[in-house]
Image: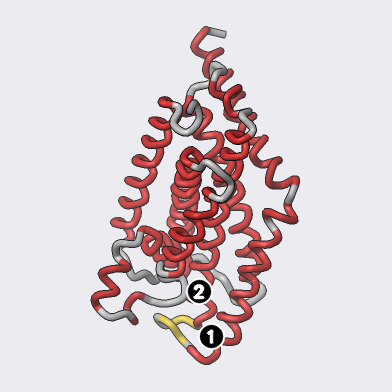
Amino acid sequence: MGFSAMRANHKFIAFETIVIKEIRRFTRIWLQTLVPPAITIGLYFVIFGNLVGRRIGEMDGFQYMEFIVPGLIMMAVIQNSYSNVVSSFFSQKFQRSIEELLVSPVPNYVILTGFAVGGMARGLLVGLVVTIMAMLFTDLQIQHPFITVSVILMTSMVFSLAGFINAVFANSFDDISIIPTFVLTPLIYLGGVFYSVQLLPSFWQVVSSLNPIFYMVNTFRYGILGTSDVDIYWAFLILGVFIVVLYGCCIWLLRHGTGIRN
């Protein structure tokens, strides 16, 4: 085996180790990480889908329950991808165990990708649980499987990277809850999870167009239901730009030791 092949093998082993550690971390405490989001989303199905949805009737030609299912799945994926990375990386930073990883001969991109994939794994697993629950309430049929899978993978990557940035700058456990509470949650609720943007006045339609989560939710809805309030190609371009920019920012922060070597 050549030297370059050995180096590549060592990098893969490091990446695999980080990912397995992250998956074991949230599966070991599954009663805290997997069950609560599923129960919360289940309550949304019951309250908004069954009770409120019966009064609303149809939205964009679909029963209200069918309309909100893609948004609720995406909400679960976003929240859990973000929270897994921000809590995991900050905990290691707080315990100063992350320093051992940073001084090891493991490239920064391997460390970052390992944490991001771990966050994606939790987000996608919770999304799968929510999808199974949704099938108990409505007949879920995916119209465009490739678009559905692509957008949910890209979205989970975006918010895993965003959670990493939050963890880098956080100085206390309170800091890792500020962004999800005051930024992420409002953007999700204003991202078209429970309504079609066509119902809004023109001014608020423009405001919604500035919300990146609006494009993610609607593209995912298009993949499942075949209807969307946004241009799908434009939405994928936005997702791609976010991934590249956030990944670059994360690598820069790791390279300079921001929030870690202070």
In the rendered image, which residue does mark 1 sit on? 53
Residue 108: x, y in percent?
48, 26
In the rendered image, which residue does mark 2 sit on? 68
Q: Amino acid at mark 1?
A: Gly
Number of residue marks: 2
Q: 144 above or below 262?
A: below
Q: Which residue, as the protein is rendered here, is positioned at the far top?
A: 2
Who comes first in sequence, dot 1 or dot 2?
Answer: 1
- Quick check: marks 1 and 2 in contact, CB under 8 Å? yes
Residue 221: x, y in percent?
44, 67
| Left or right placement of residue 199 versus residue 123 in this view | left
Give the distance between the C-alpha atoms of the residues marked 1 and 2, in whole angstroms. 9 Å
Residue 229: x, y in percent?
33, 70
Q: Which image quarter is the N terminus in?
A: top right
The image quadrant that residue 13 belongs to is top right
Measuring 42% from the left and 77% from the top, which residue is drawn there? 195
Label 1 SS = helix
Measuring 64% from the left and 29% from the top, which residue is drawn there? 17
| Residue 22 vs residue 180, the one in the foreground | 180
| Circle 2 crowding by C-alpha within 10 Å: few under 14, some 14–19, many from 20 | many
Q: Amino acid at mark 2?
A: Ile
